Image (cartoon, grey):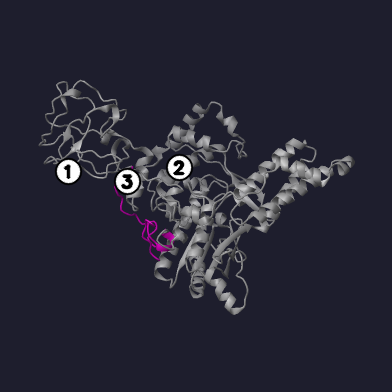
Amino acid sequence: MQEPHSEGVAHHADPESCAGDGNVAGEALTGENAGQVFSSEITSIGVPTRCCDGEGHTRRSVQRELPFDAAESQTLSMRGHSLRGNRETRKVPPPDGGGGRSGKAMPKPDSHADRESDGSIVPEKRTNNAPAVVAGAAESVEGRGPAKGNAGQVPSMPDAVPERHRSWGLLGVRLAAQRNKDTRFTALLHHITPELLTAGFFDLKRKACPGVDGVTWHEYHRDLEVRMADLHGRVQRGAYRPQPSKRAWIPKADGRQRPLGIAALEDKIVQQAVRTVLELIYENDFLGFSYGFRPGRSQHQALDALSVGITRKKVSWVLDADIRGYFDAIDHDWMLRFLEHRIADRRILRLIRKWLKAGVLEDGQWSATSAGTPQGAVISPLLANVYLHYVLDLWVKWWRSRRARGDLIIVRYADDFVIGFQHRSDAERFRGELQDRLQKFGLELHPEKTRLIEFGRYAESNRQQRGAGKPETLDFLGLTHYCSRTRHGRFVIKRRSSKKRMRAKLAQIKGELRHRMHASRDELGCWLRSVVRGWFQYHAVPFNRASLDQFRTQVIRLWHFTLRRRSQKGRRAWTWDRMQRLARHWLPPPRILHPHPSERLLVPT
């Protein structure tokens, strides 16, 4: 019995960059299970491809794409047909309990449902002179009737309807995308139902900053059913018009500011619903080494994949790459052409085009957006992954199988990616070709954040032979990676909190403590406990205990400094011993919360 596929941590026990032996088989190292054939140049973008039996090509919004015969039925968990026939339960058995000529086939119930015996057995032989989906055939096939003991009973199956009249909904979209990577979906907008819009509304952050409409989550929650019905009607009839994004700026770790685009609340709701539908398609296409903004994947999975990949493969050189202003440099024309590979519903494409062209409102001035997608919009992470899937991921997969002379691993999280090479010649040639590849699609590598370093197990031994010392360090996703060895002499990649990230976080805490200087002691303690606990939940990785101690100590010092500046009496009252007792009461002690990378990746499935 084959159940519908579901993504999750356990199903990704072998992330792509971790294939090193028989226990780990990752798709980024083998190139398998990528699910899509790639050529060196994307030259057929925009050319209509073959429309398969995808969802949207059936009548009455039927979303089942499996071939179907009138005398047969298939269920989600049925791999094939029985050699003798398909046992099925009729919706309403005939009064006399006889079998006679079999009509329409019914779905197979659970063998233990209501303790009922098997219904009529539909022969495996098909009728003659009739198409596969025609109910009335020129010649019927004799079948054996149900047991007499069930003659007067009506099965209690809630979904006992003919298979061809059942709508599989979003599950049908996912199954069609899994079955054929070339399927283009021509009808998707009808999946944007009031129920899906309502679910998208409740998925939004309730305390998020409002957009240009000024409507908050709690205000929109009033008369929610009426609002959802109106929004659904406007989306379906094409009267929905997105509003410009409100420009906001947030500080970055390096002192600069990052632009954000805050969408209006209704735009967030519709984007969340469309994102839910599109993720069912593209999660089957994305490669295993892509971890950013994907359901069931996290930053720690990307970090573990990188650590295990460098440890178990012959990696001596690492390219730490970053795309400059990626979200602001996405080309709209290329974006839509990439989407047309899978999406043929012009209404969905029109919605996405409207969001891309909605513009930005800053200080009351509207400005058009000719490139990029707003950072902060609900749909932006998915669109960014689709763009890099065609620009980078498929090209790297092709380059590894056709051009690389040695091992190559890659781990990508959004626009940050790390690529490991066995040979320096491969790394230098790849870097030059990568720059040309990105320029073709309007992107470029950040010159300051992109660097090629000697790093890994063999890098350590090679540098020792040359007397060059230890390999350089690698910063990725807030953690600094460095080469080391265990007490038994085994090579290991250790990680500690990035000093730049820690300094930025402590500066943020210092400013907030100055703002809360006259708050009560319990209020400050409760807030700092949540801050420290949040830092530990991300940074409490193996071999990082010293950084956790350092962060907690610095937070205590900042808190102590704030309490002593409250008054002259506080300078004398708040001694360091008293402060330590207060910190032990409120702040959690440092301890490692995450397992070793190899333990997390090798969970049996």
Quick check: can you spot residue 363?
A: no
Disc 2 to disc 1, C-alpha distance: 39 Å
- The magenta-colored residue range is 26-55
- Foreground residue among 120 and 416: 120
- Binning the other alpha carbons within 10 Å of mark 1 as few (below 14), some (14 to 19) or many (20 upward) gives few
Residue 354, position as x, y percentages in the image: 50, 45
Q: Which residue is drawn at 45% across and 69% down?
A: 407
**Residue 465 position by quadrant:** bottom right
- Would residue 270 appear left or right of 559 to someone viewing this image? left
The amino acid marked with disc number 1 is Leu
Residue 423, position as x, y percentages in the image: 49, 73
Q: How many labels does the image show?
A: 3
The amino acid marked with disc number 2 is Thr
Mark 3 or 2: in front is 2
Mark 2 or 1: in front is 1
Which residue, given by chain and number where applicable, does mark 3 sit on?
54
Which residue, given by chain and number where applicable, does mark 1 sit on?
83
Quick check: can you spot residue 275?
A: yes
Q: Are marks 3 and 1 in contact (CB under 8 Å)?
A: no
Residue 247, position as x, y percentages in the image: 63, 46
- Would residue 121 appear left or right of 524 to someone viewing this image? left
Indicate the secondary structure of the residue bearing disc 3: loop
Q: Mark 3 vs mark 1: which is more N-terminal?
A: 3
- Would residue 411 appear left or right of 50 to someone viewing this image? right
Which residue, given by chain and number where applicable, does mark 2 sit on?
276
Indicate the secondary structure of the residue bearing disc 1: loop
Looking at the image, residue 329 lies above or below residue 112 = below
